[in-house]
Amino acid sequence: MRMNKLYSLLGLAVRSGNLVSGEFAVEKAVKSGKAELVIVSGDASDNTVKLFDNMCRFYEVPMFRYGTKEELGHSMGKEVRASLAITEEGFAKSIKKQLEASE
C-alpha cells in the first residue's frame, strides 16, 4: 500500500513539473538549491550512490535509497532512472513521510 502511494506521488510530481530525474539534472537541482529531496534507487551503482550521498550531505538535502531503477522509471512514465530530485517542498514532505514509514 505505502509503495503504491509513494509511486503515485512521484507520478504526480512529474506531471506537475516538480521532479527532475537523471544524474545531471539531479546534480544541477541539488547544487542550485532547488532540490528538496533526492531518491537514489537501491540498485544504483556504488559510484552513483557515493556521488549523491556526498553531494546531499554537503548541500544538506535529505537523500533516500528506494526501489529499483525500473520501478522509479516506471512511476515517472520513463524507462529506467537511478536518481531523481523533488523540487517542491509539499511533495518532498509527503514523499519523505512515505519513505520514512517504509524503512
Image: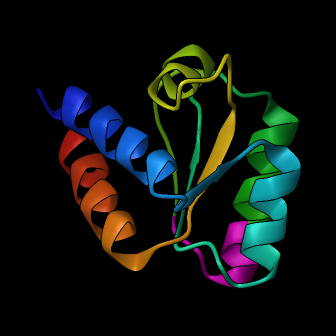
- Quadrant including the N terminus: top left
Q: Residue at x 63, y 47 (%)?
A: 84
Residue 38 as seen in the image, left or right of residue 66: right
Above or below, comparing residue 26 to residue 103 in the picture: below
Residue nearest the observer in this picture, 5 or 39: 5
Q: Which residue is drawn at 73% across and 72% down?
A: 30
Residue 61 as seen in the image, left or right of residue 71: right
Q: In which quarter of the image is residue 34?
A: bottom right
Q: Residue at x 88, y 52 (%)?
A: 24
- What is the span of residues highlighted in magenta in the rendered image? 56-62
Q: Position of residue 52 (x, y in %)?
A: 75, 56
* Colouring method of the image: rainbow
Above or below, comparing residue 76 to residue 61 in the picture: above
Residue nearest the observer in this picture, 5 or 43: 5
Q: Position of residue 70 (x, y in %)?
A: 58, 15
- Quadrant including the C terminus: top left
Q: Where is residue 85 in the image (x, y as percent from the top left)?
A: 60, 57
Q: How many labels does the image show?
A: 0
Above or below, comparing residue 78 to residue 11 in the picture: above
Above or below, comparing residue 95 to residue 30 in the picture: above
Q: Position of residue 88 (x, y in %)?
A: 46, 73
Residue 54 as seen in the image, left or right of residue 16: right
Q: Residue at x 70, y 84 (%)?
A: 33
> Is 37 one of the magenta-colored residues?
no
**Looking at the image, which residue sits at the far left?**
1
